Image (tube, rainbow, N blue to C red):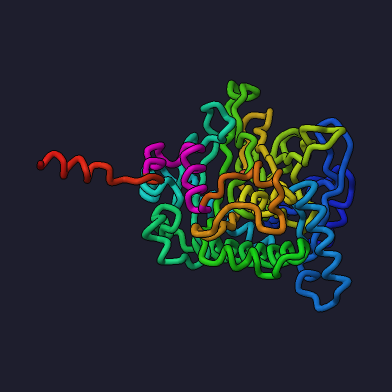
Amino acid sequence: MRGQLRDILNTKTAYGFKSGSGTIIGCPATYPKIGASAVSIPVVDLQDLSSPTLEHQEAAAQAILEGFGKYGLVYIKNHGIEDADLTRFYDSFLEFTSRPVEEKEKVSMPEIWYQRGWTPPETEQAVVAGGQPDFKECYFMAPEPLDPSAATEYPEVYAQNVWPENAEVFQKSYELIGHQLHEIGLFLLRGAAKALGLEPFRFEQAVYGGPHVTRSLRYLPLKDDQVNTGILWGEEHTDFNLLTLLPGGRFLDPSGSYCPKPDSSSGLYLRTRGDEKNPDGELLAGSAPAGCIVAQVGQELEILTGGQFLATPHVIKAPSTPGYSRVSMAHFIHLHAHQVLSPLPKFRTDDALRAYSPPVLAGTYGMKTLVDIGLAPTDVLNHLGYRHYDRLSTIRAKS
Ligand SMILES: [Fe+2]
């Protein structure tokens, strides 16, 4: 079945669709800017990253340098994630999102800034959104062991997982894919360090024990009168973590079946680095070639590399057809909260220092961002300064 589908998908107009087994694969082979020319985003073969052959390693390094440097992303093939596992996960996630709100609220945790469990629709907003929340519901979980010493200092982002009742398939398939995405990311970070001429484990050791999180998202269907009213599934933003892995989302038609993209402009778009011809970069459709997943650079990696790697601005456009929804998943690899966010010595030019100053702890940077996007309350920022001014007042009041 897969071979047949691949043949079909090699045609110019083929997009992802639902097979008899519910598997969705496939996207266009080229990635046009809206209304403009096509570009080719580099594909990294994960097997090249672990190959003992120098030629293979150099091919991977070149793809990473070009992809992360110019586009802020690469496609990855031979990654080992099975379509059937992803389908099982999305099916179980949709079963959870179909439950009554009262049930979903049992695993909704505003007290930890929604960093675990269910985030209700219209909670999060992008920094540039001007107050308009995104039209989506989400679920967060951490697939990797967390550094227990950081949990006292950053209880919200180092929180334990929460799971709904009677959701064993959801939990197991979520943990499986979250872990796989994390491992793929570590391979890629090792390749990126080598490609930049850094110690091979420079990034990998900096993320060990970090507050990595896997998020599943359901973008909500628009009603007739909501179409083309400016409602966004996800406003344009850059991810604030180090590296994001995207295994591929799926559209659903009004009957709830997986389906092709309902119209040409909906879905994920990514903005490339600006140049003389296009100072603001180009907005490209972000669908990966059949069998590939996407890895994109986050703000932390841009800062550490002094801007050599680019955090990719991306946007999720809602369809202009009512009734269609979408599920997707993202794994966010973060620096450990104790890591300092500042260009690494190799990238510490005057321009880079000016652009990425002052240095800040990754954990602090995360808190600030979660306030900016509306998940954490603003008074959290008061925790970043001295908090015992009242001590002297108390002493003076006694005297
Ligand atoms: Fe994002």
Q: Quadrant of ligand 1?
A: top right
The quadrant of the image that shows the C terminus is top left
Q: Nearer the viewer, residue 366 or 250?
A: 366
Outermost residue toward the left in this view: 399
Q: Quadrant of residue 227?
A: top right
Q: Is residue 18 magenta?
A: no
Q: Nearer the viewer, residue 76 or 10?
A: 76
Q: Which residues are magenta?
A: 361-382
Pinpoint residue 44: horizontal percent, then vertical percent. 80, 61
Residue 5 appears anywhere in the view: no
Q: Quadrant of residue 188?
A: bottom right
Pinpoint residue 256: horizontal percent, then vertical percent. 60, 43
Q: Is residue 265 above or below residue 50?
A: above
Pinpoint residue 23: horizontal percent, then vertical percent. 70, 56
Tell me the residue at 62%/24% (across/down).
Answer: 230
Q: Is residue 152 left or right of residue 40?
A: left
Q: Is residue 103 above or below residue 128?
A: below
Q: Is residue 7 left or right of residue 174?
A: right
Q: Nearer the viewer, residue 122 or 157?
A: 157
Residue 160 appears anywhere in the view: yes
Tell me the residue at 78%/63% (across/down).
Answer: 195
Outermost residue toward the bottom in this view: 52
Pinpoint residue 388: horizontal percent, then vertical percent. 28, 46
Q: Main structural element of the magenta stretch: helix, strand or loop?
A: helix
Q: Nearer the viewer, residue 290 or 345?
A: 345
Count of labels in the image: 0
Q: Is residue 347 above or below residue 286?
A: below
Tell me the residue at 69%/39% (across/down).
Answer: 267
Outermost residue toward the front in this view: 399
The quadrant of the image that shows the N terminus is bottom right
Q: Is residue 262 above or below residue 109?
A: above
Q: Is residue 17 left or right of residue 164?
A: right
